[in-house]
Amino acid sequence: MLFALFVVLSISPVTRNLEATGRLRRVQEELKEQKATTESLQGDVAEAKSLDYIEIEARKQRLVAPGEILYLMTTDNDENEVRYRVRALQSLDEAWERVERMLHSTQD
């Protein structure tokens, strides 16, 4: 009887220890996943702060840098897709030459 009482009393701490060990492993796995997510997000933040990323996002919104010309090109397909090209001007003289050519081509 005393042996049975000893076995019953010793089972309770053992089960609690096993449960605590299981919880600890789950929390450690969750922490590991959270650290990986944090590192990934820190990489995204660092990339978003770079000038290259800012330029890519600005180009997606069809913004151009000073001295560039934005050309919109449409197609005849059903998708109504609009493509654009950006070309940097070499000088202000080149810009005026382009304007003059456009004006002369519309007068003909």
Image (spheres, helix red, strand yellow):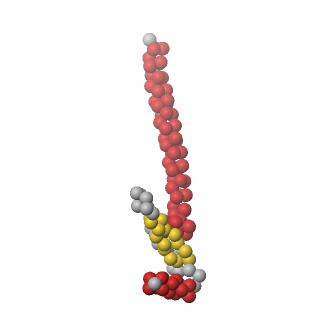
- Residue at the spot x=52%, y=58% of the render? 44
- Residue at the spot x=56%, y=77% of the render? 88
Rendered position, 105 above or below 85: below
Rendered position, 35 above or below 101: above
- Residue at the spot x=51%, y=45% of the render? 33
- Give the x, y percent position of residue 93: 56, 88
Q: Going by the picture, which residue comes out furthest to the top?
A: 1
36 or 97, which lies in front? Answer: 97
Rendered position, 63 above or below 37: below
- Give the x, y percent position of residue 42: 53, 58
- Residue at the spot x=45%, y=22% of the render? 9
- Give the x, y percent position of residue 96: 52, 87
What quarter of the picture does the N terminus occupy? top left
Q: Going by the picture, which residue comes out furthest to the front?
A: 108
Rendered position, 30 above or below 83: above
Residue 76 in view: yes
